[in-house]
Amino acid sequence: MMPDSEKPTKSPSPIEQTPKPVTAIPTLAQAATERKPVVRSSVLDRIRKTHPASSRIPDAVFRVLILLTAISVFAIVAFIVYELIAKSQPTLHAFGMHFFYNDEWDPVNDVYGARPFIYGTLVSSFLGLLLAVPLSIGVAVYVTEMCPILLRPIISFLVELLAAIPSVIYGLWGIFVLAPLLRDYLQPFLAKTLGWTGLFTGASLGIGMLAAGIILAIMVLPIISSITREVLTAVPQNQREAVLALGATRWEMIRMGVLRNARIGIVGGIILGLGRAFGETMAVTMVIGNSNEISKSLFAPGNTMASVIANEFSEATGDLHLAALVEIGLALFLVTLVVNALARLLVWSITGPTGRTRA
Amino acid sequence: MIRSLRVILCIVALTVCALGQTTLNGAGATFPYPIYSKWFSEYHNLHSDIQVNYQSIGSGGGIRQVQAGTVDFGATDGPMTDEQITASKVKVLHVPTVLGAVVPAYNIPGVGGEVKFTPEILAGIFLGKIANWSDPAISKVNPDLKFPNQNITVVHRSDGSGTTYIFTDYLSKISPDWQSAVGKSTSVKWPVGVGGKGNEGVAGMIRQLPGSIGYIELIYALQNKIGYGSVKNSSGQFIKASLDSTTAAAAGVKMPADFRVSITNPPGKTAYPIASFTWLLIPTNPADKNKGKMVKDMVLWALDNGEPMAASLSYAPLPKEVADKAKAAVNQQVK
C-alpha cells in the first residue's frame, strides 16, 4: 500500500475542464469520516476516493461489461432449460414422472422411458472416473514432484495431446484396437478371476459398458491431470520443506504436504472431468453397444443419454419420439445438476463452504 | 490503383452473378445423398442460374422441414404416414427416385462360402430364437457349408435410419412374431444384439465380432467389398442382392397413385426381397410459384437424365414404367 505522503497529487488540467470539477481530493481522513461505519478500507476503496471522477468511468464501464458476461451465463442456462421443458411437453404430459424410471424405449408403439440411458450414463461415467482419477493424480504427482526436469515438458505435452484427439478417433480406436484386446485378453481374465462378483459375466464381445468406461477414462485423463498438476504446482514450496524437515518420507511429504493442501482443486478437476464424461457422445456411442437394457455385468452393451439423442434425433419422425429425445436432454441436464450438487456438497462437507479447510 | 480497381470489378461481377442465381433448398434422407448431389451439380452445369442446396439431415428432418414449408423440397427413405400427411400444412407428392437394398452381412469363423438365408432364419436370428450358428434350421438350408458351434451376435443400427426401416419392414411382412413383438420404424426396440452407428459402424462391428450378423446397405457393401448372403424371395428363389435384382423388385409391384408403396418381399422370380424406393417430397402447390416451377423442371430432368447416372454410384435405377409414371404424376399434380 502507498503511504499517504506518496499519494499522487492533483493533476490540474483535465479535471478543470470537466463540467463539475472536483474541487479537492478528499484525504484519507476525510474519506473515513464521510463513510460513517468504516467496515474495511481496501485498496479499491482508497483508489475510488483518491482518484478523480473521470478515471472512474472506465471502471464503471468495465464493471457493467463484466456483470453482463456473468449474467449471460444465467441467461443461457435459463434459455436452455426453458427450451427443453417447452419442447418436451408432449412426453411430459403423456408419461409424467414415469418417463424417468420406465425401462421401455419403443418408438414403434410410442412408449418411452429414460431409465436405461440414465443408468448407462452414470455407470459409464463413474467407471471412467474410477479408472481415470488414480491414473491422472499419479501422472500429476510424478510430473510435479518426482520427474527429472527434462522429462517434465514431454510428459505434460503428451497428456495434453490426448485432449486434442477428436472423439471419433477414440471411437474408431475403441472398435478396432481396444475392443479386440478386451475381448481376447482382459474380459476372459476378468471373468475367470472376478466373475463371482457378477460384474464380469456373459459373452465377451469387447464392446460394451467396460469398453465405454475405459475410453472415457482416457478422454477425461488429460482434464483431471492437467488441473491437478496446476494445483500441485501452486502448493507453496515451504509446505514440502516443512514436512520433510519433520522427518517425513517422500510419500508422506506428498500425502500430507501436497495432496492434502491441493485436494479441493483436485476435486474441482474431477468434477470437470465428470462433466466431460457425461456429455461425451461420439466415442461412447461407437463402443458401448447401444442396447437399451440394464445389466449388472459390465460386459453387456448399454446406452447413454447423449448417445440416444445423437443416434435417433435426425430420423425421429413422430412428434412423441422427438419430444422424448428432448426430454432425455432434460434428464441429462437434471442428472448433471444433481451430480454436480452432490459433488459440491461432498467438498463442503470436508472443507466448509468458504473453501478453507476445517481444523 | 489499377490492381485494386480490378479487384473491385471482380467483386462486383461476382455479386451480380450471385444475385442472378436462384438457390433451391432441399433437405432430408442421407442414403441418396451421393446421387442427389451428383444430379444437382450436373443440373447446375446445365442451368448455371440454378443452384440446389441439399442438406442430408435425415428423413425425419426432411419430412419435418417440408411440413413446415422451410425448404423447397424434401427427401425421405420411408414414406410419410397418413397422420403425417393430414398434419402437414404443405401438400406433397412422393416422387420415387432410385432404389436401395439391404443385405445380411456376417462374420462366421471357418465359413468362406455364401450363406443362404430364408425369411424364417432371418426372423429367428433377429428375434433371438436362433442363437447359435450350428442351429439345424441354418444347416438345413446350407447343406454345403460347415457351421461352427458359435453363438450368434446380432449387430443392428444404433442410429435411426432408412436402412433399419427397410429391414424391419421386411421382417414385419414375413414374420407375424416380428410384426407383433417389434414392428417397423427407423428405430425399433431390438430384442437382441448390439448397435453400431451408421453402415460403417455396423460393418466395423461385424468385422470385429466373430459369429456376428448384421444388415447394411447394398451400396455400402458393394463399395467396400463386403461379402453378404442371399435371401429367399417370395417365389422361393435364393437371390443375391445386386442392382438388377433390386430394380426387379420394383418392377413386380403394383404402384399406387401416390407412390407410397413398400416393395419388400415383392412378387417376381428375380426380385431381391429387401429393397425400397427412396422418395423426393415435392410440394404440389408451392408458395413461391417461380421456385416451384424450377423444382418441377429439375425433378423431371432427374427422372429422365438422372436415372442412367445411378448405376455408376451403385444405386439401382427405377424400372422404366415407374419412372414414366412418376413423370406423369409430377406433370399433372405439381402446379
Image (spheres, rainbow, N blue to C red):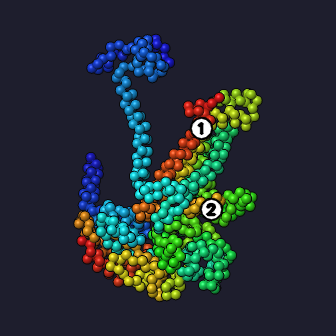
The chain to which mark 1 is attached is: A
**Where is residue A271 drawn, in percent x and y?**
57, 43
Q: Which part of the image, by quadrant, shows the C terminus of chain B?
A: bottom left
Chain of the residue that carries numbered disc 2 in the rendered image: A
Residue shown at the point (48%, 19%) measured from the top left: A40
- Left or right: A112 as drawn, with respect to B332: right
The disc, 1 or 2, on the residue closer to the chain's N-terminal end is 2
Front residue of B129 and B327: B129
**Residue A95 in view:** yes
Measured as percent of width and height from the top left, residue B259 is found at 35, 77
Q: Residue at x 27, y 46 (%)?
A: B1
Q: Mark 1 falls on what kind of element?
A: helix
Q: Which of A233 and B181 is in front in this view?
A: B181
Horizontally, residue A276 falls left or right of residue A192, namely: left
Mark number displayed over residue A300: 2
Tell me which amino acid carries mark 1: Val
A167 vs A155, left or right, is left
Residue occupied by mark 1: A347
Question: Which residue is pictured at 26% across the width and 66% down the height?
Answer: B286
Amino acid type, mark 2:
Ala
**Res B322 → quadrant:** bottom left
Label 2: few (<14), some or many (≥20) within 10 Å?
Answer: many
Q: Which quadrant holds residue A350?
A: top right
Residue A284 at what x, y percent from top left? Answer: 56, 57
Would residue A62 appear left or right of A224 to someone viewing this image? left
CA–CA distance in space, label 1 to label 2: 33 Å
- Measuring 34% from the left and 69% from the top, which residue is drawn there? B85
A73 shown above or below B326: above
**For numbered disc 2, what is the local secondary structure?**
loop
How many numbered dots are placed on residues in this image?
Answer: 2
Is residue B33 depicted above or below A239 in this figure?
A: below
